[in-house]
Image (cartoon, rainbow, N blue to C red):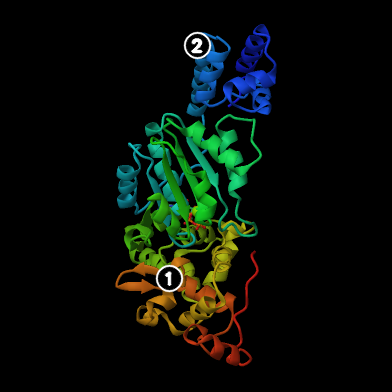
Amino acid sequence: MRNPDFGNTVRLLRLRRKMTQPELADAVNVTKFWISKIEHGTVPHPNTVAALDSVLGAENNLINQARRARTELSAHLRHTAQLPSAPPLIYGRRHELGALHSELAPHHRTPIRVLTGPAGIGKTGLAVTWAHDATPSFPDGVLYSRLHGHTPGRAPATAHDVLADLISGLGVTDLPNSQDAREALLKTLLADKKVLLVLDDADSTKQVRPLLPGGHHCAVLITSRRRLSGLSIRSSARHLQLARLPISSAADMLAGLIGEDDAEQSPRLTRLAELLDCLPLAIHAAAELVHAHGYGLGELIAVMEGPTRLQALDLAADDDPEASLSAALNASAQHLSADATALLIELAHRGDQMVDALPVNERRELLREKFLVPGDGGVQLPSLVAEWAKTVLGPRPVHRPARETTATADRDAVETKPPRRIAVA
Ligand SMILES: Nc1ncnc2c1ncn2[C@@H]1O[C@H](COP(=O)(O)OP(=O)(O)OP(=O)(O)O)[C@@H](O)[C@H]1O
Ligand SMILES: [Mg+2]
């Protein structure tokens, strides 16, 4: 935290006492460099402020000045509202919103919630909707950061850079260079504050852990396509896995987006929602095909029943790779091993009736990366994912490497055409 008045007061008091910077540094047990930073406006930890106040005979003036500076920061925080806009209407997530409200209210400790689910299922939409609703519970502000875990065409953000963004979001411009110092500063700034931190599209536990506040009054909401188990094991985070939208909500969403209010169209909307796997991203893309490309409901169903539905949905995304389902799945596939990729292709060709029969260790990676999702009656391979795997990942491999020993897999490598690794869009 910076406050030039505080620095000037320290300097004046030191000169009045005829002390050099090294003498003052010795007296309060910090480095000379740190005294120089303080005199240039950095307000130190309250313990150092108290030591300075006593050594310089400031009669609590320095302590009060530092407290005022913190209050001013708090006032800035109240205006910190970095959330993007929420979807105008959120369909089918009443239960999940209720769970977030009861579990993320600021408490005696900082609750951490991780929303997980596959590409386009609605993690960001839900997180942002809830965060807007919950803003009054966080009087010191809401911080939002995109961590770019799966943004097509770009690498995940580093914790070092995100710390810089969060710290400047809190009104502090004097950034330390080292990551440890940034972590410590963020924790200091958030101690005793009621701030909601929304970390969207996290890539890994390693990326997120340095960003977590240390105090007791904040709340953290993280979204990720990955489970980030390390956060539950070492930071007591709780997970909420988003299931696909209920079919009736998905059909309502379609009706709302395409402006269809004729009750007689209800069966067709339900059919279309089913063909779109009830996936919000695909539903939005289908609605865009109606608005921008002039499809009627019947025509759209015909296209979605045919072999080109993925291409049609991607066409709707136009120039925005983040709106393309294929690009989103490509970004997820970067995390898959060759074995898991081959298994995914095979499942896609065979149909999902065999998914439940797979040994747990074979399907674990596909579950972790959210290509397989829990559904009614067991684990499922969404049909759009199956289509993408068949058309984008490559042809069906001859063998299933996941079932082979390494030696056998090596021997067969010449006969087994490896799945194509995909380029990020
Ligand atoms: N329940 C919902 N009701 C209405 N719109 C929704 C709902 N869920 C998501 N959306 C909208 O659907 C689109 C895709 O959802 P969203 O971006 O939240 O998915 P995501 O799970 O965050 O995907 P990704 O893994 O790529 O980050 C967005 O435009 C979002 O606003
Ligand atoms: Mg998202």
**Which image quadrant: the C terminus?**
bottom right
Does residue 259 appear in the picture of this structure? Answer: no
Query: Helix, strand or loop at disc 2?
Result: loop
Q: Which residue is drawn at 45% across and 66% down?
A: 368
Q: Which residue, given by chain and number where applicable, does mark 2 sit on?
A: 60
Q: Earlier in the sequence, mark 2 or mark 1?
A: 2
Badge 1: few (under 14), some or many (20 or more) residues near its Cα, within 10 Å?
many
**Residue at horizontal 58%, vertical 76%?**
393
Which three-letter amino acid code belongs to the residue tagged 1?
A: Leu
Q: Does 293 sit above or below residue 61?
A: below
Toward the viewer: 203 or 322?
203
Left or right position of 186 against 16: left
Q: Residue 312's image quarter?
A: bottom right
On the image, the x and y values in percent for residue 317 come to 58, 59
Give the amino acid type for the residue marked by disc 2 in the picture. Asn
Q: Can residue 373 be seen in this view?
A: yes
The kind of secondary structure element at disc 1 is loop
Q: Which residue is drawn at 55% across and 89% down?
A: 407
**Picture layout, residue 193 above or below residue 98:** above
Q: In which quarter of the image is residue 331?
A: bottom right
Side of 383 relative to 100 (left or right): right
Do callouts 2 and 1 mark residues in contact (Cβ within 8 Å)? no
Residue carrying label 1:
372
Measured Cα–Cα span from mark 2 to mark 1: 62 Å
